[in-house]
Amino acid sequence: MRALVVVGLLAVLALVFVVVALVRDTQSSAGLAGGCPEGWPLADVTLREPKDVKINVYNATDEPGRATTVADDFRNRKFQVKKVGNEKKQIDDIAVLRYGPKGVGSAHLLRAYFLNNAEYDYDPKRTDDVVDVVLGGGFQQLATTTEVNQSLGDLGSPVAPEESCPMPQDD
């Protein structure tokens, strides 16, 4: 009987401890804009579907027509291609993704199409949700659907860039 009272008392204490911990939880709004320093942009960290991603495709190589070919490939994968053109300065990288706070989730998805080998060029002052895909000399082809899915698994969820805060998500 005495052991039963002790076990009951321990259960009540554990329940009180859990309730107090939940009430005092300071991490419940961690990562949300509520604690965002003034002036920091709110980054849209929603992982988008290809049909919801707007891109511009630029060729930064000496191979004519590369941007047009890759833009067609992105269109076939349901991306919204807005502009296609040439970049003035050539790059050796596989690709560079240029975007602002509204394009964080879209850039994260696009990075998977380059198997996490694209460089990020984040501009906190950029106001649109379009991602510029700049193709470099190291680019060969976009990843297959299976490779994209594996790469997304490796990348995890999109995160807000430095000196920005995640935008609150609609539930």
Image: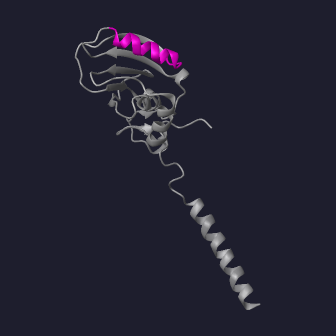
Image quadrant of residue 59? top left
Q: Which residues are magenta?
A: 65-80
List x then y, in percent, for residue 67.
36, 13
Depth order, front residue of 111/137: 137
Q: Is residue 79 above or below residue 47?
A: above
Residue 72 x, y percent position in the rendering: 45, 12
Quadrant in which the C terminus is drawn: top right
Dominant secondary structure (helix, strand or loop) of the stretch shown in magenta:
helix
Residue at (24% x, 22% y) in the render: 91
Residue beneath the point at 59% across and 65% down? 20
Residue in the image at 73% along x and 91% along y = 2
Residue 151: x, y in percent? 45, 37
Which quadrant does the N terminus fall into? bottom right
Q: In which image quadrant can residue 139 be found?
A: top left
In this view, the residue in front, 65 or 168, is 65
Residue 72 seen from this side: yes
Residue that sits furthest to the right in the current view: 1
Q: Is residue 74 above or below residue 105?
A: above
Magenta stretch holds residue 75: yes
For image coordinates 39% across by 38% down, the residue present is 38
Taking depth in this image into account, of 124 and 147 the one nearest to the observer is 147
Which one is nearer the viewer's eye here, 157 or 140?
140
Does 162 appear in magenta?
no
